[in-house]
Image (cartoon, rainbow, N blue to C red):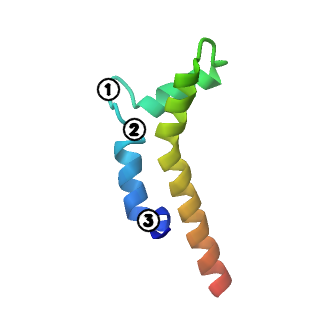
């Protein structure tokens, strides 16, 4: 799946889905703070929402890591 390794697409996904809604703070940031605070009161929909907004970031980190590993082994 070429699109999962396209860092430009993944960066766009991070800046849109990964951060939306933007105000008063990026949504994923609020969810991560909630989890860091003990996740008190989080329901299954909140966990799903965290995965939905966090997946583009995880895929971007994976794509960058794979890119560096491929370049390093090619040398």
Look at mark 1 in the image and give the residue it sits on.
23
Question: Quick check: 34 above or below 2?
Answer: above
Can you give x and y, in whole percent of width and height, for residue 42 in the image?
Answer: 59, 17
Q: Residue at x 33, y 31 (%)?
A: 22
Category of crowding for the residue at label 3, using alpha-carbon neighbours closer than 10 angstroms: few (below 14), some (14–19), many (at least 20): few
**Disc sitting over residue 11 in the figure:** none
Relative to 32, say whether 39 is above or below.
Answer: above
Taking the view exactly as shown, the residue that stands out farthest to the bottom is 75
From mark 1 to mark 3, how far is it between C-alphas?
A: 29 Å
N-terminal label among 1 and 3 = 3
* Mark 3 lies on residue: 3
Q: Give the answer, above or below, for where 5 lies relative to 25.
A: below
Task: Report whether 72 appears left or right of 64.
Answer: right
Which element is circle 3 on? helix
Image point 47% across, 70% down: which residue? 2
Q: Residue at x 34, y 31 (%)?
A: 21
Indicate the position of residue 64 as horizontal and vertical percent values: 54, 64
Label 2, on which residue? 19
* Dot 1: element: loop
CA gap between label 2 and label 3 equals: 20 Å
At which x and y percent is residue 36? 63, 25
Of pointers 2 and 3, the one earlier in the residue sequence: 3
Dot 2, crowdedness within 10 Å: few (<14), some or many (≥20)?
some
Q: Which of marks 2 and 3 is in front?
A: 3
């Amino acid at each position: 799946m070429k699109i999962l390794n396209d860092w430009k697409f993944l960066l766009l996904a991070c800046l849109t889905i990964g951060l939306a809604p933007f105000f008063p703070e990026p949504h994923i940031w609020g969810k991560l703070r909630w989890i860091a605070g003990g996740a008190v009161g989080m329901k299954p929909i909140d966990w799903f929402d965290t995965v939905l907004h966090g997946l583009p970031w995880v895929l971007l980190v994976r794509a960058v890591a794979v890119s560096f590993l491929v370049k390093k082994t090619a040398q």
